[in-house]
Image: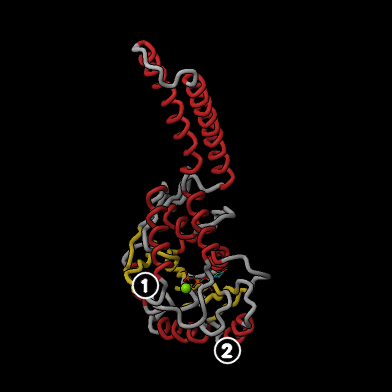
Amino acid sequence: MKITYSIIAPIYNEIDNLPELHRRVKEVMDSAGASWELILVDDGSTDGSTEKIRELAEADKTVRPIIFARNFGHQVAITAGWDYARGDAVIIIDADLQDPPETILELAKKWKEGYEVVYAVRAEREGESWFKKLTAAAFYRLIYSITDVKIPVDTGDFRLMDRKVVDVLKQMKERHRFPRGMSAWVGFRQIGVQYNRAARVAGVTKYPFSKMLKLALNAITGFSYFPLQVATFFGFVSAGVAILAIPVVIYMRIMGSGAFFGQATTLIAVLFLGGVQLISLGILGEYIGRLYDEAKGRPLYIVRDAPEEQ
Ligand code: UDP
Ligand code: MG
């Protein structure tokens, strides 16, 4: 059977949200007038979500359960969803109903207009602590400023992607994954749709600060060389200061100043050698960055339209 929409929900201990998630997705998608499937990826839940997912799948054939052997993390759960999705459009949605399923129809509208990635932008965030909002806002802006690909701010994983985009994402086999960065990286026609992020229906966040930090690291290292280049920058600063200090010290000596007497050569030598070492580290960093790129093995280019034969 041809499927138009695949909705993917990663699930980690969301037992109390599952019936409501299923009910609301079903209500919305049945009104969309096209075939759909709901892919529930159980990311090693321990609260009985697994059995609940099996129950839902038993009762409703549009539900497709994918049960992980253990907790592999949100990003990997999304990836498994991409692998199993059969639809022409693939939608990722949180299982806690913070992303209202009703918004899917708005995403689908843009898709029908010809956009290949329609991401949902959070206009308001309800029921989240000021700490979460602050760290999230800082995170999005930091990522935006240092990554090479412009990853839209205030945007989570809630988005719709065309089959063409998902087929490209499936070729990106990097192990430390940042799906929203990956979907920005591929290009294609992209557009944002604003929505109000609701409070969780039940349960607590599965993203403690440690996991957020890990995600931020994946985003930075996956999409920027910035940390590898920091050493070069400081190296040039340090060596530059040393080189500038030489004429200054000579001038001071000529003028009869006793400042830095007996220390100047040592200070300059330390600064200069420190600088040289940092620059060398930076050079190593550049090579490691290139190795890292090769290891990620991302496609060199992505074609939107081309003649059938090469
Ligand atoms: N999730 C997951 N594996 C994890 C952590 C979270 O599949 O290791 C799922 C979770 O069940 C939810 C989504 O990822 O559907 C987003 O998690 P959460 O709502 O806890 O994050 P927050 O909205 O607080 O950032
Ligand atoms: Mg949530």
Question: Mark 2 and mark 1: span between their CA atoms?
Answer: 34 Å
- Residue depth check, mark 2 versus mark 1: number of the one nearer the observer: 1
Image disc number at residue 59: 2
Callout 1: CB less than 8 Å from ligand 1 = no
Task: Look at the numbered disc 2 and give the secondary structure of its residue.
Answer: helix
Checking the image for residue 259, the label placed there is: none
Q: Position of residue 266 (x, y in %)?
A: 52, 21
Q: Nearer the viewer, residue 159 or 48?
A: 48
Q: Residue at x 43, y 76 (%)?
A: 98
Above or below residue 239? Residue 139 is below
**Measured along the vertical axis of the image, is residue 226 above or below residue 169?**
above
Residue 109, image x and y in percent?
33, 71
- In the rendered image, residue 47, in percent from the top left (x then y), is placed at 62, 81
Q: Amino acid at mark 1?
A: Arg
Local packing at callout 2 (Cα closer than 10 Å; few below 14, some 14-19, many 20+) is few
Going by the picture, which residue comes out furthest to the right? 69
Residue 154 visible to the viewer: yes
Q: Amino acid at mark 2?
A: Ala
Disc 1 on helix, strand or loop?
A: strand
Q: Left or right: 5 with respect to 210?
A: left
Q: Which residue is mark 1?
A: 125
Q: Is residue 167 visible?
A: no
The tag earlier along the polypeptide, 2 or 1, is: 2
Q: Is residue 60 above or below residue 104?
A: below
Give me the residue at 48% from left, 86% from top.
20
Q: Residue at x 40, y 82 (%)?
A: 28
